Amino acid sequence: MPSFSAKPDRTASSPPKRIVFLAFEGFLAVDLMGSADAFFVANRVATRPLYELEYVSAKGGRVTTAAGLVVHTRPVKDVLSSRFDTLVVAGGPFVEDAIRQPSFIPLVQRLARKARRICSVCSGAFVLGAAGLLDGKRAVTHWASCDLLQSLFPAVRVEVDPIFIRDGDVWTSAGITAGIDLTLALIRSDYGGDIAGAVAKRMVVFLQRPGGQAQFSAPLRAQITSARRSGTYSQRVHRREPGRRFIGYRTGARGRYGAANPRSYLCKEIRQTHASQARRGRTRRGGMPCPKCK
């Protein structure tokens, strides 16, 4: 377990660190926004500008995210005149299209030469891989793309489970929201655990998640299995049929499905999906283990 003890306060005397975010058409908004918001919150909790955020794309102007949001960017050439602290490359479902553009990877390489450290979020690792910035280094990306990253860039040592990896001056994160975890680690490296912890608390996230990017954990597998069977508890209880007595879920009263309160349904779900009490932990309602599930 790494130490989160605060380092000496360097916020008062140091100028803001320039963070340059590289966007492309069809990037995933949270890959960029999650990290940017964490840096912004760091400025707020420190009550002084720790970070200066800049957003660039190959040609500048309006860049549209995969979900249709529009981000206004500056051309990459505008930030190449001087060095900056951190380059953050977002990922997204259209990252392959960006990589195929003849001028894109050379721009990434030029940006990397100006940055003190280089970061990717989620499938942004493919951009770094195509630019040769991950050769000989450990790296991670979204769990569903790790095998592809390894096959495309055999010189990279791809690991599947870590939320983020730092190898020298190159940082890579796992899928999507893991970019926030990576950013908290950057803030902790820059300004210590007190600032990073305050940011995590303000954003209501873990300073360090328990475990790796095991998205298909036992609880999630159980939830997916349950949903595939016949819908969740709330769907069942709220499904009213003609001639049937119905009282809503929030009243706690019985409907067509008898005394199927949230806790008893969860216990039934645990038994039906063969997930033991040890794997599922305490029940979500009431916090006490059910004797039937032990």
Image (spheres, rainbow, N blue to C red):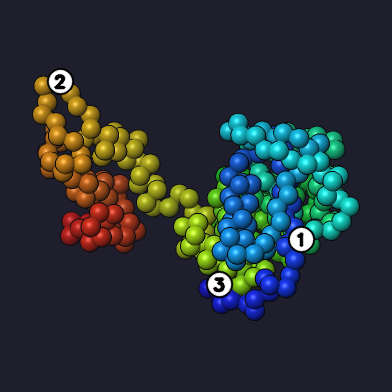
Quadrant housing the C terminus: bottom left
Mark 2–mark 1 Cα distance, whole angstroms, equals 65 Å
Across and down, in percent, residue 149 comes to: 68, 47
Q: Residue at x 58, y 68 (%)?
A: 195
Depth check, front residue: 219 or 73 = 73
Report the residue marked by disc 1.
85
Q: Position of residue 39 (x, y in %)?
A: 63, 57
- Please rate how many residues cluster around mark 2, counting C-alpha atoms within 10 Å: few if below 14, some from 14 to 19, many from 20: few
Of the residues tagged 2 and 3, which is closer to the observer?
A: 3
Assign a secondary structure to mark 3. Answer: helix
- The kind of residue on which mark 2 rests is Pro
Which residue in the structure is indicated by mark 2? 242
Taking 228 as reference, is 47 above or below it?
A: below
The picture places residue 131, in percent across and down from the top left corner, at: 80, 48
Please give the label number shown on residue 194. 3
- For image coordinates 73% across by 62% down, the residue present is 17
Q: Which of the two discs, 2 and 3, labels the residue nearer the N terminus?
A: 3
* Left or right: where 225 falls relative to 259: right
Residue extending furthest bottom?
8
Q: Earlier in the sequence, mark 2 or mark 1?
A: 1
- Toward the top, the furthest residue is 242
Q: In this view, does 52 lie to the left or right of 58?
A: left
Which structural element holds mark 2? loop
Q: Dot 1: what SS?
A: strand
Residue appearing at x 71%, y 42% in the figure: 23
